[in-house]
Amino acid sequence: MNKSTLSILLSFAIGLGIINLSILFYQSKKNDKPNIQDNGNKSQIRGMVVFQTYCVLCHGEKGDGTGRLATGKIPPPANLTKTMLNDEQLKAIIRGGGASVGRSEFMPPWGEELNDSQINDLIEYIHVLKTK
Amino acid sequence: MKYILLLMLILSANLSAKEYTVDQKDKQFTMSDLVIKVGDIVHFRNSDPFFHNVYSLSPLKIFDLGSYPKGQSKAVTFDKPGEIEVNCAIHPSMKIKIKVEK
């Protein structure tokens, strides 16, 4: 086997390796996102839609507080995967916003935008985020 | 003399900066496009009876004005030329494009 054949084979192998690594990386990222389509109840699915429409910007896909708009915020958006708040406390902060309970003013009051049913669905989905 | 000239230069720059007001009404910005010059100031006024949260994630001008109620206005100075998309974090359909010219 001459040198040029060897270098072509080597380049091919490196190329395949890069493609495989890219696929693995994509799959690992894809799995980061909670997927409840298969086994979630309807409330959780509706809650996921609300979360992805309104909350993901600050709280991030995984709900860990690392959304695109989280950068530089002090305090940072809550890590919902580790929240210690009970449902009533979650409802209060979602409805009235962060400032209403002495927390971040960047958390808007959602009471005008989301109805009670949507807020309940959202809390169901937050429970899903906590188990991931 | 040098400092007087510098002061005059700063003052003239501030005087030439224009101020614009973009209203937020009926869950919409009152315009979809705005063309301004570098250094101009845009006031984002909330005229809706509920909160708005104006922000931009355009690399040219990243900001988040936080949520604020009816009657309040918050201002942003645009200091670099280019196009910036401004949205509302509470109402994802709200969008305005601001073109900043040299």
Image (cartoon, rainbow, N blue to C red):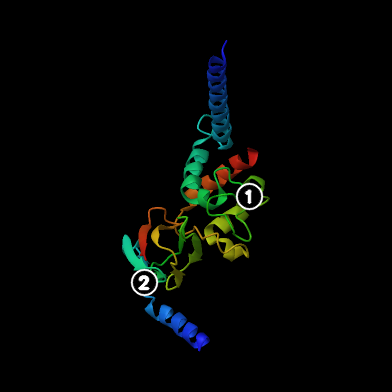
Instruction: Name the spot of residue A1 as percent of width and height, x first.
Output: 57, 10
| Numbered circles on residues, count | 2
Where residue A79 is drawn, which disc sits there? 1
| Residue A37 position (above or below residue B94) | above
The type of residue carrying mark 2 is Thr
* Depth order, front residue of B17/A6: A6
* Depth order, front residue of A46/B45: B45
The quadrant of the image that shows the C terminus of chain B is bottom left
Distance, label 2 to label 1, CA atoms, is 36 Å
Instruction: Name the spot of residue B70 as percent of width and height, x first.
Output: 43, 70
Please name the residue shown 55% across and 37% down the image: A33
The type of residue carrying mark 1 is Asn
Where residue B21 is drawn, which disc sits there? 2
Badge 2 element: strand
Badge 1 element: loop
Instruction: Name the spot of residue B32 as percent of width and height, x first.
Output: 31, 60
Instruction: Name the spot of residue A32 as percent of width and height, x first.
Output: 58, 36
Q: Which residue is outermost to the top?
A: A1
- Which chain hosts label 1? A
* Depth order, front residue of B80/A7: A7
